[in-house]
């Protein structure tokens, strides 16, 4: 029988990641779906809003250092981040209203808000 010594750092990191996803889910449910589409970028340093009509590259301060986000051709992607596993970069660009991308280790999150609501198809295909 193994001797458990209590809560570990990895347990705390998993809890923080779960809370982050929960808060993100709540914010997506409450997001505005009218008007022009925009990219919302959140980090420990603040929140930034950018229209999606112009191409630009933005450096956003995060917990580990700056993350670089590219807004191009009506989509957005994390193109650089100081995180160790680079999952946020390999995830690619987001382009639909309500979609999001995040670098959890750096605590930088981007999501697309506004624009017309997307049509959804239920399980029956209607």
Image (tube, helix red, strand yellow):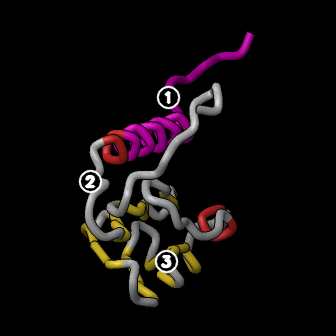
Q: Secondary structure at mark 2?
A: loop
Using the image as rendered, state which of residue 44 and residue 53 is in the foreground: 53
- Label 2 – label 3 distance at C-alpha: 18 Å
> Magenta segment, which residues?
1-25
Q: What residue is disc 1 on?
A: 7
Q: Is residue 11 visible?
A: yes
Q: Nearer the viewer, mark 2 or mark 1?
A: 2
Question: Is 52 one of the magenta-colored residues?
Answer: no
**Residue lying at 50% horizontally and 74% vertically, measured from the top left:** 76
- Label 3 – label 1 distance at C-alpha: 44 Å
> Residue 81's image quarter?
bottom right
> Residue 87's image quarter?
bottom right
Q: Position of residue 72 (x, y in %)?
A: 52, 84
Residue lying at the far front in this picture: please name it.
Answer: 126
Q: Position of residue 70 (x, y in %)?
A: 50, 82
Q: Secondary structure at mark 3?
A: loop
């Amino acid at each position: 029988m193994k001797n458990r010594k209590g809560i570990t750092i990895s347990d705390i990191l998993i809890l923080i990641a779960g809370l982050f996803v929960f808060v993100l889910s709540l914010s997506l449910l409450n997001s505005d779906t009218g008007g022009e589409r925009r990219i919302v970028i959140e980090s420990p340093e603040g929140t930034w809003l950018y229209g999606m009509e112009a191409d630009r590259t933005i450096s956003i301060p995060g917990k580990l250092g700056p993350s670089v986000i590219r807004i191009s051709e009506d989509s957005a992607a994390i193109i650089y981040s100081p995180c160790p596993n680079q999952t946020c970069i390999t995830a690619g660009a987001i382009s639909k209203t309500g979609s999001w991308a995040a670098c959890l280790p750096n605590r930088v999150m981007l999501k697309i808000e506004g624009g017309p609501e997307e049509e959804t198809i239920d399980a029956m295909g209607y």
